[in-house]
């Protein structure tokens, strides 16, 4: 089987793609990968060198990096048309059996191949979660909604990483003809759950993304030292830090870290604060769980769906209740360890990369007769 996969290099989709591609290649699937958003850094693309070191050849895995804008960017329309033409050229030359598309727009490609469209996130549900109302009308938003709706309508199968996200897609863009949920996953062996924990609180979240809501940790004095890791520069170039909020000596702000450093930070932190207002799945809390951190999570539907019974919840966007929940764990180390063990067990049971890849393999195989009909 030969799968063409699209991805982007801006956020968690890149990490998701790494896990998926690696797992597919191990199962004998040929992969052609095309990325958008920006050319990956050396740190981002290092896993591809590891694939080659394991013996994967150009016949198994082909990669095309591009810097075309992503569909949620304000200047995207012209780039999306150009990138779709580029993608069709790759399809004609490399002749995959099936398309796995991690952007909505490409669901409407002029191709007879079966296509899986994955709904990682979208602008309208992000806006509703962050601001509690529909986004303001604009010509760009009209274009975006039409593009997303068209891509979803023409998908052979729509996949979401949580039931909540699938419901959001149905609510804002119409019910797909065929939708399903496949949870994201990470490889447990990449993380260290056996390091001695320190009385520290960690969160990972892009500082330019209001949906991550990491600035909530600056709103009150928290009961232990806090480290906030995340870029403050928007992909379209402007910086959006928290200059308006004073940062106490108890707070440490760090830019985006490479994987080795993140594994160290997660391994040492006793508590992970999942502060998001909007999180269709959330790879960072999963990575924290695989590092045996106790998870304190905002009470949003997706986190309840994924972590009910394995995390301590606080009222969404309520800094006082966040501090209360964190204080409860800091004051009771045995309870903190218990929540860490619960999160670790949930992650190992339900959210591994192997489980994710097997679920995608089952889906691909179900669509194989359609691919054969096209051939």
Image (cartoon, grey):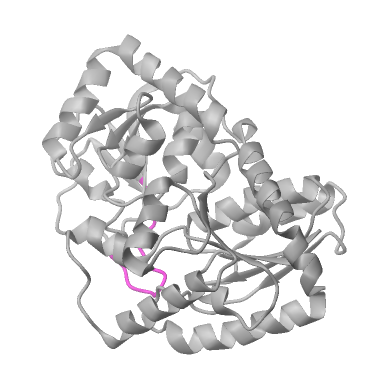
Between 232 and 279, the residue placed more toward the observer is 279
Quadrant housing the C terminus: bottom right
From the top left corner, tell me how far across and down residue 143 is, in percent.
37, 84
Q: How many marks?
A: 0
Is residue 265 something that shows in the picture? no
- Residue at image x 63%, y 87%? 85
- Relative to 220, say whether 142 is above or below: below
- Residue at image x 65%, y 84%? 86
Is residue 176 something that shows in the picture? yes
Magenta span: predominant SS is: loop
- Relative to 360, say whether 232 is above or below: below
From the top left corner, tell me how far across and down residue 322 is, in percent.
19, 34
Left or right of residue 143, residue 224 in this image: left
Spot the residue most to the top: 334
Range of magenta residues: 229-240
- Residue at image x 80%, y 75%? 94
Left or right of residue 261, residue 372 in this image: right
The image quadrant that residue 192 belongs to is top right
Left or right of residue 196, residue 189 in this image: right
Q: Is residue 233 magenta?
A: yes
Q: Is residue 270 magenta?
A: no
From the top left corner, tell me how far across and down residue 194 is, in percent.
54, 19
Left or right of residue 247, residue 231 in this image: right
From the top left corner, tell me how far across and down residue 178 is, in percent.
53, 59
């Amino acid at each position: 089987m030969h799968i063409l996969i699209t991805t982007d290099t801006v956020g968690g989709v890149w990490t998701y793609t790494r896990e998926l591609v690696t797992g597919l290649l191990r199962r004998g699937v040929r992969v052609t990968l095309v990325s958008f958003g920006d050319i990956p850094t050396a740190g981002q693309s290092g896993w591809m060198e590891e694939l080659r070191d394991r013996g994967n050849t150009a016949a198994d895995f082909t990669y095309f990096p591009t810097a075309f804008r992503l569909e949620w960017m304000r200047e995207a329309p012209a780039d999306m048309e150009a990138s779709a033409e580029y993608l069709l050229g790759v399809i004609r030359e490399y002749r995959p059996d099936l398309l796995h598309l991690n952007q909505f727009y490409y669901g409407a490609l002029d191709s007879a191949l079966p296509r899986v469209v994955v709904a990682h996130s979208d602008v309208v549900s992000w806006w509703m979660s962050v601001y509690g109302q529909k986004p303001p009308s604009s010509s760009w938003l009209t274009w975006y909604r039409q593009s997303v709706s068209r891509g979803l309508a023409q998908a052979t199968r729509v996949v979401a990483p949580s039931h909540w996200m699938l419901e959001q897609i149905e609510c804002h863009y119409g019910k797909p003809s065929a939708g399903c949920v496949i949870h994201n996953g990470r490889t447990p062996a990449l993380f260290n759950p056996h390091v001695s924990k320190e009385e520290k609180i960690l969160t990972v979240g892009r500082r330019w993304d209001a949906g991550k809501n990491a600035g909530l940790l600056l709103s009150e004095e928290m009961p232990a030292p806090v480290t906030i890791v995340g870029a403050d520069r928007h992909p379209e170039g402007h910086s959006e830090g928290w200059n308006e909020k004073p940062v106490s000596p108890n707070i440490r702000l760090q830019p985006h870290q490479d994987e080795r450093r993140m594994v160290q930070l997660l391994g040492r932190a006793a508590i992970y604060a999942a502060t998001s207002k909007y999180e269709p799945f959330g790879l960072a809390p999963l990575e924290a769980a695989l590092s045996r951190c106790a998870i304190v999570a905002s009470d949003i539907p997706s986190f309840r769906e994924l972590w009910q019974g394995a995390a301590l919840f606080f009222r969404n966007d309520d800094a006082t209740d966040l501090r209360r929940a964190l204080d409860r764990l800091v004051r009771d180390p045995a309870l903190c360890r218990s929540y860490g063990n619960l999160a670790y067990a949930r992650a190992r049971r339900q959210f591994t990369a192997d489980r994710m890849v097997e679920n995608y393999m089952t889906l691909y195989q179900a669509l194989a007769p359609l691919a054969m009909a096209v051939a």
